[in-house]
Image (tube, helix red, strand yellow):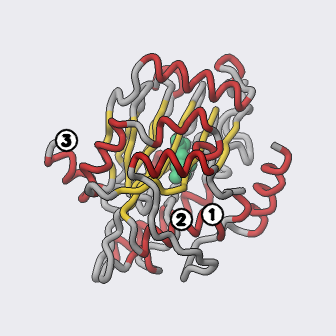
């Protein structure tokens, strides 16, 4: 059972930290699996002095796979991991289900301020309207590298996940500023670290960060090995359905697919399989990447 303060932090700030969530055996197991899948070993992850190169998103050698946890059976034990499931139940309630929004990363850090939610413009779209259903979704990121070897920290803008009835001028300015910083981070890889309101969490092997997908967050520029595994959970309501359909259908360039029947069975047995998921191909104000980016990502994925 987690403390009330921990739960309150999640509600108010939008994120919580679960230190030492994986055992030493699990850390080594998942590191090996990620190295095999990506073909990148610890020693190959370096910046070789090309810091700040135009378009560089992490190290020279980096790999990231959307839907990666769902697609690779070796990672399924994470979804039903008792400690993770208990932590998420403590935050959202007992009826959580697996939300198919997952990623695997090796040598990759998302170095710009962004949201992982469907509606990424603050206050605009159904994610921000909780009048008929509360937004009860989380993303959990599990890290396997040390801060000393990677320099990696995940930054959050506390409270940026919470809808406001009346959006203040200060809040609008902050959103606009961070959007520009986000766009510019393609040119200046450390720019995101200047956001004064940010809280930066340096992660150690086996740590897990759980956050509301609407929170503004950014990875830091990395200088050494980084391994991360992201997965999602939520309570089934309109926000869950929008989010699941967004990644599975609207973001076609990410290559999400129906989950394997064996995984569905496993989730059923653990009480984590969504019971009522409808199919939809349109969601109001859903964020889509600029076309150019979409084409590039699509091409990159086909090659992989
Ligand atoms: O670099 C990271 O670990 C954060 C990744 C992230 O924010 C994302 O994949 O959406
Ligand atoms: Fe993200």
Which residue is the site of mark 2?
A: 244
Disc 3 on helix, strand or loop? loop
14 left or right of 194 in image: left
Q: Residues within 10 Å of mark 1 (few under 14, many from 20)?
A: many
Q: State whether residue 17 is above or below residue 159.
A: above
The picture places residue 146, in percent across and down from the top left corner, at 47, 23
28 left or right of 138 in image: right
From the viewer's side, name the closer residue of 102 and 300.
102
Q: State whether residue 169 is above or below residue 33.
A: below
* Mark 2 lies within 8 Å of ligand 1 (Cβ measured): no
Residue located 21% across and 50% down the image: 7
Between marks 2 and 3, how big is the CA–CA gap? Answer: 27 Å
Callouts 2 and 1 close, C-beta under 8 Å: yes
From the viewer's side, name the closer residue of 107 and 97.
97
| Quarter containing the C terminus | top right
The picture places residue 84, in percent across and down from the top left corner, at 36, 40
Residue located 61% across and 80% down the image: 282
Between marks 2 and 1, how big is the CA–CA gap? Answer: 6 Å
Which residue is the site of mark 1?
A: 248
Between marks 3 and 1, how big is the CA–CA gap? Answer: 32 Å
* Mark 1 lies within 8 Å of ligand 1 (Cβ measured): no
Which residue is the site of mark 3?
A: 2
Residue located 49% across and 47% down the image: 231
Residue located 48% across and 32% down the image: 143
Q: Earlier in the sequence, mark 3 or mark 1?
A: 3
Q: Residues within 10 Å of mark 2 (few under 14, many from 20)?
A: many
Q: State whether residue 218 is above or below residue 226.
A: below
């Amino acid at each position: 059972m987690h403390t009330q303060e921990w739960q309150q932090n999640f509600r108010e700030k939008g994120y919580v930290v679960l230190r030492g969530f994986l055992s030493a055996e699990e850390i080594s197991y998942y590191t090996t699996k990620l190295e095999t899948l990506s073909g990148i070993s610890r020693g190959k992850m370096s910046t070789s002095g090309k810091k700040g190169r135009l378009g560089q998103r992490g190290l020279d050698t980096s790999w990231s796979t959307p839907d990666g946890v769902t697609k690779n059976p070796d990672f399924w034990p994470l979804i039903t991991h008792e400690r993770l499931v208990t932590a998420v139940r403590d935050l959202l309630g007992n009826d959580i289900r697996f939300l198919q929004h997952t990623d695997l990363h090796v040598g990759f850090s998302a170095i710009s301020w962004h949201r992982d939610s469907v509606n990424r413009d603050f206050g605009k779209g159904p994610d921000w309207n909780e009048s008929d259903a509360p937004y009860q979704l989380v993303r959990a990121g599990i890290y396997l590298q040390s801060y000393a070897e990677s320099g990696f920290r995940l930054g959050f803008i506390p409270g940026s996940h919470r809808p406001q009835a009346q959006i203040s001028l200060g809040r609008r300015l902050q959103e606009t500023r961070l959007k520009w910083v986000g766009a510019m981070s393609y040119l200046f890889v450390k720019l995101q670290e200047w956001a004064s309101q940010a809280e930066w969490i340096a992660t150690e092997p086996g740590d897990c960060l759980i956050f509301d997908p609407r929170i503004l967050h950014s990875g830091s520029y990395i200088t050494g090995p980084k391994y991360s595994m992201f997965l999602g959970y939520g309570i089934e309501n309109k926000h869950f359905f929008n989010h699941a359909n967004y990644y599975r259908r609207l973001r076609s360039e990410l290559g999400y697919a129906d989950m394997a029947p064996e995984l569905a069975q496993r989730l059923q047995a653990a009480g984590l399989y969504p019971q009522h998921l409808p199919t939809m191909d349109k969601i109001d104000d859903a964020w889509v990447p600029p076309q150019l980016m979409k084409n590039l990502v699509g091409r990159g994925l086909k090659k992989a």
